[in-house]
Image: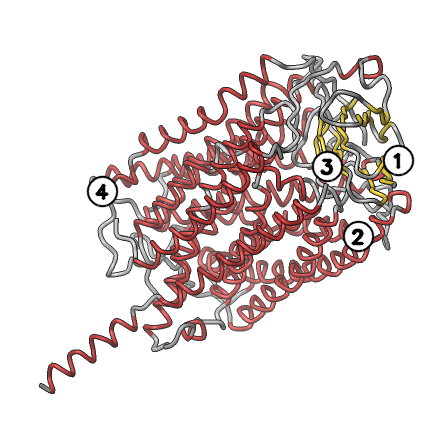
Amino acid sequence: MNTLNAKIDRRDGKLVMAHFYVAFIALAVGGLAGLLQTLVRSGKFQLPAGIGYYQILTVHGVVLGLVLTTFFIMGFQIAATSRTSGTLSNLQRKLGWIGFWVMTAGTLMAATMILLNKASVLYTFYAPLQAHFIYYLGLTLVVVGSWLDGAAVLGKYINWRKQNPGQPSPLITFMAVVNTMLWIVATIGVAATVLFQLLPWSLGLVDRVDVLISRTLFWYFGHPLVYFWLLPAYMAWYVVIPKVIGAKIFSDSLARLSFILFLLFSIPVGFHHQLMEPGIDPAWKFLQVVLTFLVVIPSLMTAFSLFATFESFGRSKGATGLFGWFKKLPWGDARFTVPFIGMLSFIPAGAGGLVNASHQLNQVVHNTIWVTGHFHLTLATAVVLTFFGISYWLVPHLTGRVLTKAMNKLAIYQGVLWAIGMTFMSGAMHAAGLLGAPRRSSFSEYGGAAQATEWIPYQIAQAVGGTILFIAIILMLYIFVNLAFFAPKGEEEFPIGEISDHAEKTPMVFENWKLWLGITVLLILFAYTIPFIDMIQNAPIGSKGYKLW
Amino acid sequence: MAKTELNRKTKTEIEDSSSLKGTLASVFLLGFFLIVTWVSVYFLFLNRF
Amino acid sequence: MHMHKFEKIWLIFGIGALLVFLTVLGVSAFYLGNQPPSCLATINPEKVDTTAPFNEPGLKKVEGKDWDYELVYVAQAFAYTPGDIEVPLGAKVKVIATTKDVIHGFEVAGTNINMMLEPGYISEFVTTFDKAGEYLILCNEYCGSGHHMMASKIKVVK
């Protein structure tokens, strides 16, 4: 049932590749911006030609956090659906193309405003810093376009269910559907603040904006956003990696259960980004902290499933002892090794995340560069290295080429280089953050303060790490171009794992969307209604816009 | 007699090949890492004013 | 749904650890009063200079309260008022701050004093300055081109 299309239809393939071109251009631009930031913060380098630090910081965040991720994920999810649930209908493909162009137009609008220095407000665009309205409009179009892409995936899923009544949908399609729903529910928050608050305000239609409500709507979106990034990586870990190494999927049901838990618990938790803020009752903050801890559980399950997949595989190859299976894994295969580095990085990433979400413990790390170190392990290692690992087979699969041995070797170097660079950069960020060094700040000696002097060696370590990472990015871009245009013609497999023979039949309850979306909405209402009413009732006078850059 | 012994032997081998004790050990190592990190920062919090 | 015995053990252990963390945090927050800064008071951000206590920023001794001093800060792009300040060692202080323009951070590096300042709201945190030394106050939320220059200093002295 999982092999409906061993090869993705060419027309769907073109749509996916269009998304990937934009994603990898974003990697080039955003990676360069990141390199420049670490160099500036080392204190040994200044930006030429009057370019501002916060301008390139905005570029880095928008282009990598929003553009690379959204384009890659939409492309990958369309590919996974087309592969396992069948070729898109003409209407669905058209929706996908409209979505792609709307997202691209939005990206160009936002990028233009950043380059003109009219939008140096970072990718979180906290009011009352006020960007040009075209910046907000551009980001809105990126979201709207992604909804159209999502509609194509949902449409194909509905077709499949109609054609296969009473059957559980293909696992990776199911996962893509969960992530699409998560994305749609989450983006309602950011759409609300942009459409009803920031756009009218930046257009001059209204004078003032309610800052706390805008931030709360943003963070209602901001945390599920990180799960929207993570779940495609989990799709690859659960479904693709077992096939790559020649093992079976440990449990179809538990994989679905963990995805449903992500849908339920990743949204009503935005307050854990607002723990240090005035205007929110600490009891409500704590309630969302508890809900945040619940979203750890599916990741604990995922860790077990993955280790179990690896151990079962190793033992089937004759491994013995407690850790003998580890040596049996196919370390020479970049499609496995590079995402595996990503999985490993998720261990310290998760540990740091627990600290961040721990109510008053957040005082130790809030807005320090520890946080930057944290999401460079989650997003910029676990997720991104998995995306690279996907590209190694998906790009040649779509372009009718193969990953050669030479490219495979280069890809492994790329992954290892990334791990080394990130150890330096993220490690130094975590350490400096505990000492108090702030995130999102240009180089500063803070008037010669002794504490700030202590941070400088760590900032130099970050620049060393950033430079190594940039070399890894160049390697990745070289591999991508090779796989897209130059690699030898051939057939590259789109690996989709099969379910272990020991696994039992998947219960149909997982496909009961009325139930899951119903609980999702109830949890959101439970966590947000009262504090939101409080914010509106006790609102201070709103803020006028400021352009302080 | 010999036959039953042979059977028993293959059975234990099958059990061993489907053992997940390495998985259990790995996730517990992971769990201890989470706890150590959390407790360290908690003590940093207690130590600071 | 079938779950492997080891996975059950792992989940019981993992969820148990999460519960312990939450209990420690909850007791510390609700019983010992270690809540994150969550002041609910509001202010007109355009009238900060004429609203008490922000009309007189700085350190002030107070009587009959749970704390000995109030330390009042006004933040605006890109400075804090007052600048350098001295606090006696061991003093229990309520730090009170607000912003006149955009969102700023208020972090006393190397301490647990770390709060967001948002226009229209007052932020407060009570703590005992029990370690001598020089502490850097800095803005840790992006506020514009001079963000990284925005700083002040607290000296905790005997």
Q: Amino acid at mark 3?
A: Ile
Of the image marks 2 and 4, the number of the one nearer the N terminus: 4
Residue C72 image offset from top left, x and y in percent: 81, 25
Circle 2 or circle 1, nearest the eye: 1
Extreme residue toward the front, this view: C64
Q: CA distance from mark 3 to mark 1?
A: 16 Å
- Give the answer, above or below, for where A274 lies relative to A195: below
Classify residue A540 by image quadrant.
top right
In the picture of the structure, the residue carrying the numbered disc 3 is C113
Q: Amino acid at mark 4?
A: Asn
In the picture of the structure, the residue carrying the numbered disc 1 is C86
Q: Amino acid at mark 2?
A: Trp
Crowding at mark 2 (Cα within 10 Å: few <14, some 14-19, many 20+): many
- Asked if residue A142 shows in the view, the reply is no
In the picture of the structure, the residue carrying the numbered disc 2 is A455
Q: Dot 2 lies on which element?
A: helix
Residue A1 image offset from top left, x and y in percent: 26, 52
Q: Describe residue A400's horizontal placement relative to residue B38 as left or right.
A: left
Residue C148 image offset from top left, x and y in percent: 82, 39
Q: Describe residue A413's horizontal placement relative to residue C73 as left or right.
A: left
Q: Dot 1 lies on which element?
A: strand
What chain does mark 4 sit on?
A
In the picture of the structure, the residue carrying the numbered disc 4 is A164
Measuring 51% from the left and 58% from the top, which residue is drawn there?
B32
